[in-house]
Image (cartoon, rainbow, N blue to C red):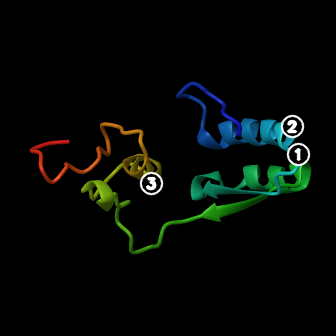
Amino acid sequence: MVVAVTTASVQDRDGGRTVLDRLRFTMPSMVTVFADGGYAGRLVVHARQFLRIAVELVKKPADQKAWSCRAAGWSNAPSPGWCAAAGSTTTTNACPPPPKPWSNGP
């Protein structure tokens, strides 16, 4: 929907504001977005008051220690998005597809 590439020195919250501003312009019908807990604070207030977009903060369960990528045989993938690659036709080095039963590797 919207992508904003920033330098590493830009905090996620600040980059998130740019993304939400662009999102409101390109997709005015958007009413809710889901974001990591790191986006809590002024970004949520800006989205609600000025853009009229609800930001639902998604948090992992307190007892969860790592994301799981069991479909590819990995138990500590960097993020859930990397795990999605295992189920698609696209693969990454971080979460390769499981080996075929008749082979010795991926």
Query: Where does the image place residue 22, in percent across and percent down from the top left?
Result: 79, 35
Disc 3 marks a residue whose amino acid type is Pro
How far, Cα to Cα, is label 2 from label 3? 28 Å
Pick the quarter of the image with the N terminus: top right
Vertical side of 10 occupied by 16: above or below: below
Q: Which residue is mark 2?
A: 25
Q: Residue furthest top?
A: 7
Q: Total marks drawn?
A: 3
Q: Which residue is mark 1?
A: 28
* Residue name at image x 39 percent, y 75 percent: 63
Residue 61 spot, x, y in % from top left: 47, 72
Q: CA distance from mark 1 to mark 2?
A: 6 Å
Categorize mark 3 by other alpha carbons within 10 Å: few (<14), some (14-19), many (20+): few
What amino acid is labelled 1 in the image?
A: Pro
Secondary structure state at the residue bearing disc 3: helix
Q: Earlier in the sequence, mark 1 or mark 3?
A: 1
Horizontal and vertical percent for residue 48?
Answer: 84, 56
Q: Label 3, on which residue?
A: 80
Indicate the quadrant where residue 90 lies: top left
Badge 1 vs badge 2, beta-carbon distance below 8 Å? yes
Category of crowding for the residue at label 1, using alpha-carbon neighbours closer than 10 angstroms: few (below 14), some (14–19), many (at least 20): few
Residue 30 relative to residue 38: left or right: right
Quadrant of the drawing holding the C terminus: top left
Q: Is residue 105 left or right of residue 66?
A: left
Position of 98 with respect to 58 (left or right) is left
Is residue 38 rendered to the left or right of residue 102? right
What residue do we see at 44% from left, 51% from top?
84
Q: Quadrant of residue 73?
A: bottom left
